[in-house]
Amino acid sequence: MLLQIVKKEFQRNKIITIVLFIFMMLSALLAACASQVIMELSGSLSNLLDQSKAPHFVQMHSGPIDNAGIQKFSSTNPLVKNQQTVEMLRIDGSRIILGNSNKSEEYSVMDIGFVKQNPSFDLLLNLENQVIRVSEGEIAVPIYYKKQNNLNIGDQVTLSNGQLDQKFIVTEFVRDVQMNPAIVSSKRFVVNDADYTALKKNHGEVEYLIEFQITDLSRLSEFRNSYQSADMPGKGPMIDYPLFKTLNALTDGIIAIVIILVSILLMLIATLCLRFTMIATLEEDYREIGVMKAIGISQRDIRNIYLAKYMVMAACASLLGYLLSLGVVRLFTANITLYLGTAPKTMLQPIVPVLAVGVIFGMIVFFCRVILRRFNRVTVVEALRSGTVGELKGNTSRIALSKRKHINVNVFLGLKDVYGRFTMFGLLFLVFVICLFIILVPVNLLNTLQSPRFISYMGVGQSDMRIDLQPSDQIEERFNELITQLNKDADIAKFSPLITSRFKVLGSDGVWENINVETGDFSIFPLTYVNGGTPESGDEIALSDLNAKEWNKRVGDNVLLEVDGASKKLTVSGIYQDITNGGRTAKARLPYDPKSVLWYIVALDVNPNVSVQEKMDQYAKLFYPAKVTHLESYLSQTLGNTIRQLKLVTGLSIAISISISVLITALFLKMLLAKDVSQIAILRSIGFTLEDIRKQYQIRLLLVSGLGIILGTLAANTIGQKFVHLLGSFMGASKIQFVVNPLVAYLILPLFFMLIVALTTVVSTISMKKSNISKLIVE
């Protein structure tokens, strides 16, 4: 019986039923996709961490190393479960050619390291998550280069030191639990033990990864503090297990959150449409309702008949949405599968998407019950008398047609109707607001990530280029030579030498910790600060957002650092955002000890009409093997994977929003024309042409869409901005500000949106031609 009712309802209102069905189905589809992405991400990441036997604590170190001291520390510390010290051979990108390209990796932002397979943990895996084993002459290349350079199995990797070329065949791609993400600027290539020994004689410098697995992960901070207080090797970044998880999950986690947001907004649209549709259906069926009451059917039974129709529709839409998600989800999980692999299926993986779809179905049924409950108070007599159920009408007497001045009649009548029935038009208004929000937030976020200004969220000021000097023999002399050369170079507009050193700081728990502090003049290329500003004296320090939160520090608070062997109190001058080095950095004007220097950087701008690329070539040759980087390419190389994924979601969001706008406009106009059938007849009888009436409806819809665009844009720049702040907080940039392209966000997209609404209105109002005026007047 229920299927018969649904079938007749579909035959009577095909367009309305199809539109509602599509909204419900899309909500279920995206909810299922988002939950599957989260489950896949969680399972694959956990599996990668397990299969690779991920280290819990890693200290990178350049320079001489005390292996005996490390062994003594490991044997006496009860928290240490396993320890290994791994060599990594740093090779300059200018010596490496990947695949068939004629260009080296000279301008790559990545620090390239060659390693052997690790003996016990921190295992480097292939695309099947098996431990990589390569023979002589073979090489395993990081997945990053498979995507970035389109490398394939069988391609060549060539190393050259100017005298000897050494070629390797790519036989595997590396899943590296430490250095997988593009945002991590170090990458490990795996070669055979014999090849590594040969390379060590002819190429690069050795760095060390001092790795630990501990017995109790909940005591990781305790272990970190004990390592730092034991005066262990520490000339390099320090990373740990929670950071591995965060960085590996970052890109796909953001995408999953965006999908969930779109799904929730679609659910809201579906609810609004349900409300309008059910009210319109009840108004249309008031005679049938009266008949059913007259023959003794209770109000509860009548309500259940209407509820059953939407329950069947919601069930079918939810089922179809779930089935479609099984194919569509591959678009979103392809990146997870590539970078993290596929985990063995668990019982929860198929259940969670079903539960997510079940929640969508339950919400639809719940809202149907809520909507139907409000009509319990309305009698059939009241419905017959008013011809409507629950519609509120504004007072339009103050805007009478006779009082209009210099306004076209059709324009005036359209505006007056929107004012008089704003409760009804408010539904369409809210849908337009949500649709524009769904479009603008991903577009603005994508534009922000692609903007050169995003470099400020990576802890550096905006400049044309930067030169990195990694620790090596005579690095102090080379740094001084570089400064001398820059002072002589007339093509250089300005430059800022910056030196990063390791200092000890008193943490919030009263334990001395290590902190990377960058020293120099930060007024030359200033950062964007969340609070406060640049440290201007030797008694001030600026903290990264994550450090400030971890130590509970605000601008004006004091921080105790150990400088030249003595404690020094510094005042926090500002808090900035930094997504590099785990988001835990600081900046100050302090004297530095050359022995504790981690790296040297010089940021610089060239004069107008000077080629940045030519200047990069010049300094790359003069100060080889210094890494010379164009700041714009730095962003594209580190955030490229995130940007590609976000482009997919942005395109999908725009397509969904435009489709919703078309469908809801057509649905709304169909119902409105049916509702206004007698009013249209009266207008035509007093001389208004069909063209006049169409213009009135077009004015109504354009006015509502215009208001929706205004509020949608405001919502995207406020609520959407807060949403981006939430996403940024996971990586140390909790105050990311949208970089908006005004031409796209405020002109092209809104005009395109209004054009779609206008065209839909024109097409939808064509049906009025078929109406017989005499029949309409009789009705």
Image: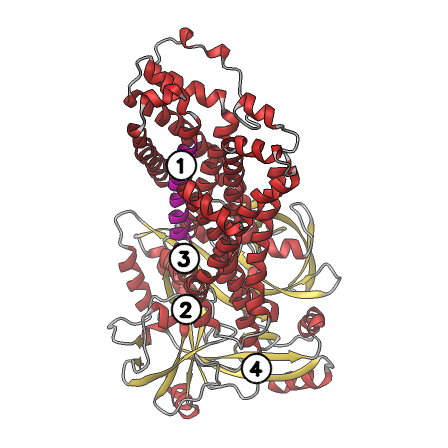
Q: Where is mark 3, residue-wise?
A: 643
Q: Earlier in the sequence, mark 3 or mark 1?
A: 3
- Is 95 situated left or right of 337 in this image? left
- Nearer the viewer's eye, disc 4 or disc 2? 2
Q: Position of residue 665 (x, y in %)?
A: 40, 36
Q: As rendered, which of 58 and 65 lies closer to the eye? A: 58
User: What amino acid does circle 1 point to?
Assistant: Thr
Q: Residue flagged by tag 4: what amino acid is it?
A: Ile
* Helix, strand or loop at mark 4: loop
> Spatial distance from mark 2 to mark 3, Cα to Cα?
18 Å
Question: What residue span does the magenta drawing correspond to?
Answer: 647-671
The residues bearing labels 3 and 1 have C-alpha atoms spaced at a distance of 32 Å
As drawn, 162 above or below 602 = below
Mark nearer the viewer, 1 or 4: 1
Location of the C terminus by quadrant is top left
- In primary-sequence order, the first of circles 2 and 3 is 2
Q: Amino acid at mark 3?
A: Ile
Q: CA distance from mark 4 to mark 2?
A: 24 Å
Label 4 and label 3: CA atoms lie apart by 39 Å
Residue 65 - label: 4
Q: Main secondary structure of the magenta part?
A: helix
Q: Decide which of 368, 405 is in the foreground and name it.
A: 368
Badge 2: residue crowd in 10 Å (few <14, some 14–19, many ≥20): many
Residue marked by disc 2 = 110
Foreground mark, 2 or 1? 1
Identify the mark at residue 665; answer none if there is no mark: 1
The residue that appears at 37% across and 92% down in the rendered structure is 136
Residues at discs 4 and 2 in contact (Cβ within 8 Å) = no
Mark 2, secondary structure of its residue: loop
